[in-house]
Image: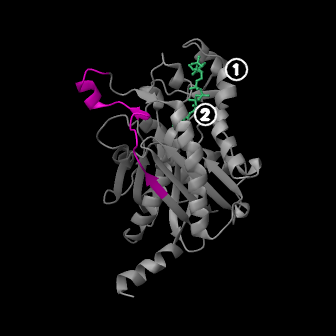
Amino acid sequence: MDKLSTLRAEWPQIGLKILGLGHALPAAGPVPNSYMETLVDTSDEWICSRTGIRERYFCGRQTNIELAEQAAAEALARSGVKAEQIGVCLVATFTPDRMSPSMACMLQQRLGLPEDSLMFDFNAACAGFLYGLQTARQCLLAAEPGRSYALVLGSETPSRVLDFTDRNTCVLFGDAAAAAVVELSVDNPYWAVCGSKTDNENMLYCSGLADQQQGKPGGVVHMQGQDVFRFAVDIIPHSIEQVLAKAGLELADIDHVVCHQANNRIISHVVKKMHAAPEQFFINLQHYGNTSSASIPLALNDMWEQGLLLPGQRVICVGFGAGFTWAACLLTW
Ligand code: UT7
């Protein structure tokens, strides 16, 4: 084996540990389904029975960077890691306040992160946080001494890009930010798969500058819900199986599964398809709706706050979103 292959062979043995989680929700408080009934022709009964969502948060005048800062500060405080020890800051978002500068750069200034560290935003839609963990792990290998921690966020304000006259989309999403401080670890095995494919980019998209140039509204979410549903119930079991195969484990060896929180009917389909125990699958979408890239870290944060995450437990996280993108990882707590 040449030197590079030898080094690469060691790579899977380097795991990833989450040291602290944090979150932020808009201060205006939860918006119940009854409020959505005043905007569009919908009902609490329809939203609950078709999705499981009961309430969500909208940021109003609050900005995405304010949510991100609050979530990141909480994750840093809980991890015991100081801002100056951060070597990488990655923000998954499809709803940055501005197209430039990046939210990660704004966090550098707000949190006092080192100026000579790697900071950037990226868009992998609802799979973003898991893409972020994977990227952070790779970046940390090359981090400067003393900068061995990464800050990874999913931070979203979908309410800025929802059409509040479209009942197919506006009842589904909510705003939130969640963050994790991570480090490389040989005691915390980590396995991951990420992917993307675009058969039809119009199934789920948020319009932008090119749409505006063509006279269409920019910054509006469009979704063909049933197509996305079908994609989700295929890709979630597939990526869970892929990550289990990499780890040499069975689903029964896993303590918790955290799916992207879009619709509890998607999660029920997955449970049935995989002959899994429903209690293995954590669900909190009833409180927040679909918060895109924030949904998985927000679920992990809730689980941690509820005392559900215990040392040594194995947790599979799995996300999917516009692109389509998908990602799954197995974390050891
Ligand atoms: O992170 C992004 C990933 N996105 C997702 O994971 C979304 C995946 N898709 C879904 O979760 C579901 O497809 C939806 C929740 C979006 C829709 O549920 P569905 O059971 O697939 O409903 P549908 O689209 O087949 O619509 C059924 C009916 C339609 O009326 P007609 O044509 O049967 O008269 C819709 O117009 O429900 C109607 N409808 C609504 N009715 C009341 C659609 N939205 C609403 C609404 N309130 N908010």
Figure quadrant of the N terminus? bottom left
Picture residue at 36% right of the left edge, 87% below the top: 2
Residue 206 is a magenta residue: yes
Residue 7 on image: x %, y %: 41, 81
With respect to residue 280, does 244 lie above or below?
below
Classify mark 1: residues with Cα within 10 Å, few (<14), some (14-19) or many (20+).
Answer: few
Picture residue at 34% right of the left edge, 58% below the top: 118
Residue 271 on image: x %, y %: 70, 47
Q: Nearer the viewer, mark 2 or mark 1?
A: 1
For badge 1, the amino acid type reads Glu
Inspect this view and state whether residue 24 appears.
no
Residue 69 on image: x %, y %: 46, 43
Picture residue at 46% right of the left edge, 63% below the top: 149
The mark that comes first in sequence, 2 or 1, is 1
Q: Which residues are magenta?
A: 194-216
Q: Secondary structure at mark 1?
A: helix
With respect to residue 38, does 89 lie above or below?
below
The answer to which of 147 and 210 lies nearer the viewer is 210
Q: Which mark is residue 45?
A: 1
Q: Where's ligand 1: which quadrant?
A: top right
Inspect this view and state whether residue 44 appears.
yes
For badge 2, the amino acid type reads Tyr
Q: Is residue 209 left or right of residue 52?
A: left
Residue 84 on image: x %, y %: 41, 59
Model colouring: one colour
For the residues labelled 2 and 1, the Cα–Cα distance comes to 17 Å
With respect to residue 260, does 163 lie above or below?
above
Which residue position is annotated with label 2?
288
Residue 41 is a magenta residue: no
Figure quadrant of the C terminus? bottom right
Classify mark 2: residues with Cα within 10 Å, few (<14), some (14-19) or many (20+).
Answer: many
